[in-house]
Amino acid sequence: MTEALPLEGSPLVQPSTTDHPLYDSVVAACRTVYDPEIPVNIYDLGLVYTIDITDENDVTILMTLTAPGCPVAADMPGWVAEAVEPVDGIKTVNVQLTWDPPWGMNMMSDEARLELGFM
């Protein structure tokens, strides 16, 4: 059993199944989805907390948004599911939103920080 790892300064979240053969393809699909207000993909923004892929290739993505009042809160999970569903080998996709832990700028990748001028 894998232990959940804490996001920096936050409660525990389930770790991603990074050893699954489809993991990199799911990440690449997530990187095609952009927050409409920030010119960076949702993965590098740190909005994707967990990508869980079962042995049957069912995918569950736990993600957040930059703020609970985000104007695309109702649409973003569908955008992510639509991006991941066509990945060859994926059976089903379930995208869940969470607000715990809340998103923070410290969750962005170095690439996102560079693109937004924070580095």
Image (cartoon, rainbow, N blue to C red):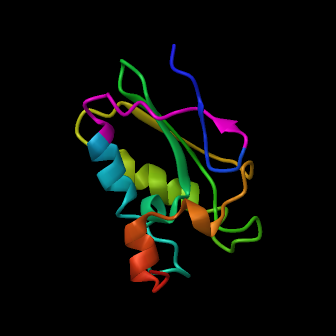
Taking depth in this image into account, of 78 and 17 the one nearest to the observer is 17
Q: Position of residue 11 (x, y in %)?
A: 73, 40
**Residue at the location (27% across, 45% down)?**
25
Q: Is residue 61 above or below residue 102?
A: above
The image quarter containing residue 57 is top left
Q: Please, which residue is most extreme toward the top here?
A: 1
**Residue at the location (71% across, 47% down)?**
10
**Residue at the location (46% across, 83% down)?**
116
The image quarter containing residue 115 is bottom left
Most common SS among magenta residues: loop
Q: Which residues are magenta?
A: 11-23
Q: Is residue 20 magenta?
A: yes
Q: Is residue 52 magenta?
A: no
Q: Position of residue 48 (x, y in %)?
A: 52, 52
Left or right: residue 63 versus residue 92 is right
Q: Is residue 14 above or below residue 69?
A: above
Question: Number of labelled discs?
Answer: 0
Taking depth in this image into account, of 16 and 58 the one nearest to the observer is 16
